[in-house]
Structure formats: structure tokens, C-alpha cells
Amino acid sequence: MELSPAQLRDLNRAWGEMSIAQALVRAGLPDSARAVTLGARRGADVDPVRQLAWAEAIVRTWLGEYDEALRQLGIFLAGSLAFASWWGRPEAELVGPGFEASHP
């Protein structure tokens, strides 16, 4: 962690924790995986693109917690679209043609 730029240390630490949670699921330790996952959550101030929510969605899917996995994917997509829009790319361009028509 010391080699990471200061502004990325907390995010990188959380990424490492999500990787540990994935390993814990694979090792058959679901309760430990859940605990580590909850501890690895960060707000938009640390993770503006909300990529940790994507990593958590993987863990939740492996745990069979599909409702929470979908909730986390929603957080990730909302953060990703907001971030991409901030960079000047319209949301419709990011999700494909017809998105706005099919999602009022």
C-alpha cells in the first residue's frame, strides 16, 4: 500500500479486501466473505466510479445472494454512467442505441 499514491491507498486496500472476500467464498467460508465484503465498502468519495460495488456483486453472486448482487450492480452502473457523463460522454452512447426508449 505504501507504494500507491496517497489518494488511491484506501481504494487499493478495499480492492484487496474484495479479492480476499472472493477467495473466502471459494474456500467455503461464506460468513467470513460477507464480513470482509461489508468492511471493504467505500463511499463515492473514495470510489467515484463505484467499481467496488461491481466487485461486491461478484461476491454476492457467488454467495447466491442475487438481490444484493443486482443492487450492487445498480450502484456500479449509476456511478459509472455519472462518471462517464462527467467526462462528456452521453449516457445513451455508453449503453447503446434505444436505451432511453426502452427505459423511460
Image (cartoon, grey):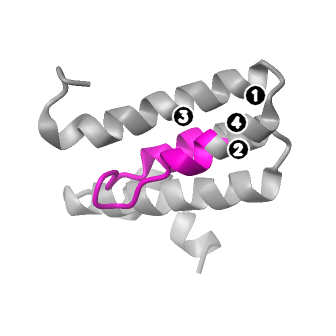
Q: CA distance from mark 4 to mark 1?
A: 6 Å
Q: Quick one: SS at disc 2? A: helix
Residue in the picture at 58% in, 73% down: 101
x, y percentage for residue 66? 81, 51
Q: Is residue 42 left or right of residue 36?
A: left
Q: Specify the amino acid type for callout 3.
A: Met
Location of the N terminus by quadrant is: top left
Locate residue 52 relative to residue 45 in the image: left or right: right
Q: Which mark is residue 25?
A: 1
Tag 3, which secondary structure?
helix
- Mark 2 to mark 3 CA distance (whole Å): 10 Å
Residue 26 % position (x, y):
76, 20
102 on left or right of 53: right
- Quarter of the figure with residue 43: bottom left
**Residue extent of the magenta highlight:** 36-57
The residue identified by callout 2 is: 34
- Asked if labels 1 and 4 touch by Cβ distance under 8 angstroms, the answer is yes
Residue drawn at (73%, 57%) of the image: 68
User: What is the distance, in whole Å, between disc 1 and disc 2 at their CAs?
Assistant: 9 Å
